[in-house]
Image: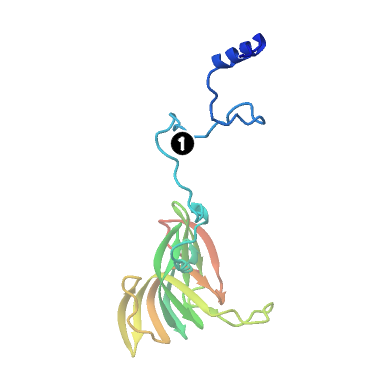
């Protein structure tokens, strides 16, 4: 005789039959409530403010222009040649001019009325000037005249004066023009020396007669003028002697 199952068992079997089939996938990790997001390897979009990429940095530093060493060292410019002092020219006239220990140095620069000009440079040990007359312009229309006693001989030498312990240095004469007669071996040779026509010979002892010398400077030596008379006259006034 078959035994009928109880109603409770039949009801449990019916509930199980209505459940969907179970999956074989493993259950989620109870330690994580949400999946881990993944990161992408795509680069971020470029900025729209500049379409040009920034320049790559150089590993070698660049010196600023002011600190870069010069490519080549140029030699320093030569020092300017010295210029004789001068200032205003003065004119010497004499019936005779003797120069002892004379040396013509050459053509050099000198200052005349604020301008640099070419002049003749002489050095000498002694000058003897017979019937000396010196004139110099001091202002328009007037000149300063220094005249020696008629027939006297003025000198420029290197003999020490009473208040000098050492003799003056060698006499230097800067000349714009020397014009007169050169007495050489008994002959009178007319000469006119300038920077454009300098002396062709260097003679240590020389004598000029009826000479006119226009100078810019005289350095060294002691000038002695017997019976000197100094006066200011007009340009048209004749030179008088005592």
Front residue of 119/14: it is: 14
Q: Position of residue 91 (x, y in %)?
A: 43, 66
Residue 154 in sight: no
Q: Position of residue 204 (x, y in %)?
A: 43, 87
Left or right: residue 92 compared with residue 28: left
Q: Is residue 41 above or below residue 114?
A: above
Front residue of 55/200: it is: 55
Q: Position of residue 67 (x, y in %)?
A: 52, 56
Q: Residue at x 44, y 77 (%)?
A: 122
Q: Residue at x 51, y 54 (%)?
A: 61
Left or right: residue 179 compared with residue 111: left
Q: Quadrant of residue 176?
A: bottom left
Q: Is residue 94 above or below residue 236?
A: below
Q: How is the image coloured?
A: rainbow
Q: Residue reaching furthest front?
A: 1
Q: Residue at x 44, y 52 (%)?
A: 141
Q: Is residue 117 above or below residue 58?
A: below
Q: Position of residue 3 (x, y in %)?
A: 64, 13
Q: Quadrant of residue 158?
A: bottom right
User: Which residue bears the numbered disc 1?
Assistant: 43
SS at badge 1:
loop
Q: Quadrant of residue 214?
A: bottom left
Front residue of 142/216: it is: 216
């Amino acid at each position: 005789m078959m035994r009928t199952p109880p109603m409770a068992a039949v009801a449990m079997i019916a509930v199980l039959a209505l459940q969907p089939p179970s999956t074989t996938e493993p259950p989620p990790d109870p330690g994580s409530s949400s999946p881990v997001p993944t990161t992408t390897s795509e680069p971020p979009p470029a900025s729209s403010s500049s379409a040009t990429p920034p320049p790559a940095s150089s590993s070698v530093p660049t010196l600023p222009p002011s600190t870069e060493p010069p490519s080549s060292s140029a030699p320093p410019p030569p020092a300017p040649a010295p210029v004789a002092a001068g200032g205003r020219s003065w004119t010497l006239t004499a019936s005779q001019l003797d120069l002892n220990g004379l040396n013509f140095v050459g053509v050099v620069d000198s200052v005349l009325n604020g301008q640099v000009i070419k002049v003749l440079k002489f050095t000498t040990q002694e000058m003897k000037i017979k019937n000396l007359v010196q004139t110099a312009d001091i202002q328009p229309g007037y000149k300063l005249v220094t005249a020696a006693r008629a027939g006297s001989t003025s000198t420029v030498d290197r003999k020490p004066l009473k208040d000098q312990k050492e003799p003056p240095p060698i006499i230097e004469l800067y000349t714009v023009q020397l014009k007169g007669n050169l007495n050489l071996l008994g002959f009178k040779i007319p000469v006119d020396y300038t920077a454009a026509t300098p002396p062709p010979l260097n003679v240590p002892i020389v004598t000029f007669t009826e000479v006119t010398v226009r100078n810019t400077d005289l350095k060294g030596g002691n000038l002695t003028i017997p019976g000197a008379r100094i006066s200011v006259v007009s340009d048209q006034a004749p030179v008088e002697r005592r």
